[in-house]
Image (cartoon, grey):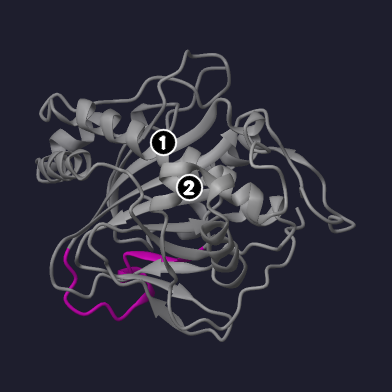
Amino acid sequence: MAIPASRTLAFSEIPLIDIGPLVAKGADNAPEIVAAIRKACMEVGFMQLINHGVPRPALNRLYGEAQKFFNLPVEERMKVAMANSPYFRGYLPLKYEGDEYLGTNLQEAFNTFHERPIGANPVHGPNQWPAAVPGLKDAMMSYFAECEKLAYKLLPAFALALGLKSNHFDAMFREPLIMLKLNHYPLQEKPEHENEIGVVGHTDSGCFTILWQDNNGGLEVQNKAGEWVGVPPIDGAYVINLGRIMQILSNGMFSATEHRVINRTGADRYSIPMFVNPSYNTTIKPLVGDPPADFKPFLSGHYQEDVYRRTYPHKKLAA
């Protein structure tokens, strides 16, 4: 599949944008913020947002429950291992990444999606929840709902930034494929080798990501000059980055930028990303300009499902 080339510049810092007016009045009534988002999408592919509207208590509650879960004995965590689920939901032990990244990521995680009826498509199904942390389900689903509201505030801004009508993405995200993930990076003394990195350099596969990171930092973004630029933790801010789906939709106008995580702090690191993708049956193709000559449209869900199957251990459904 040909992905339109991006136009990432040799940036030296990640833009910080106050989106309070956009949250309050909508993207159509916040042209200056849309312009700032457009600039960040074109030049960096990353930005940090403040005054985003996600309640701090919802985040704090989930963070506390996440710490409880990752502090459980490994036998308890493995009771909800993703290997037990055919729907890519549950606990991922250290160095879980499959195929391309096998054994290279020093990270453990816990994945959830919307819970939707089984059978509509191969990724719809129930989440797994640990009996030993009874508060995790409500905390995670409450935060999921709040963070999803932010996603729906950003979609009109992305559309306007591409020169489209603000409601252009509405039909594409009627039943979005959204993953909310808890990440835990154990403390590392002095990582020196590729297999000691928290997460190796990569681009996200989907449309865009809404990320909270704790105060330990460690997220780094690669600019076009090949330099790794740190994304400093800012209290109350969320990191937004674009994935390969958005790069395709924008026909390369927006960039899916290489990034990695290295936990150099000597302390445990936590992050909570929400990966936002169009509905399963949405056709993905450039929305502006002429696509590359060899580009072939594809379904969002087929693409994401392939990524999940190559990346995550999972239970295979009977034929």
User: Residue 243, labelled with which disc?
Assistant: none
User: Residue 311, labelled with which disc?
Assistant: 2
Amino acid type, mark 1? Lys
Q: Residue at x 52, y 68 (%)?
A: 258
Residue 291 lies left or right of residue 267; in this view the side is right
Residue 309 or residue 274, whichever sits in front: 274
Q: Residue furthest right?
A: 293
Residue 18 lies left or right of residue 36; in this view the side is left
Q: Tell me the quarter of the picture where residue 193 sits.
A: bottom left
Is 215 placed above or below 11 here? above
Q: Tell me the quarter of the picture where residue 125 sits.
A: top left
Q: Residue at x 12, y 30 (%)?
A: 133
> What percent of the width, then of the height, locates residue 120?
57, 16
Mark 1 vs mark 2, CA separation in Å: 28 Å
> What percent of the width, then of the height, locates residue 70?
16, 45
> What percent of the width, then of the height, locates residue 129?
24, 26
Q: Secondary structure at mark 1?
A: helix
Residue 120 or residue 215, whichever sits in front: 215
> What percent of the width, then of the height, locates residue 241?
48, 58
Is there any visible trace of residue 207 in the rendered image? no
Q: Which residues are magenta?
A: 187-202
Amino acid type, mark 2? Thr
Decide whether residue 272 is among the magenta residues.
no
Is 163 placed above or below 254 here? above
Residue 91 or residue 234, whichever sits in front: 234
Residue marked by disc 1? 149
10 Å crowding of disc 1: few (<14), some (14-19), many (20+)? some
Q: Secondary structure at mark 2?
A: helix
Decide whether residue 195 is among the magenta residues.
yes
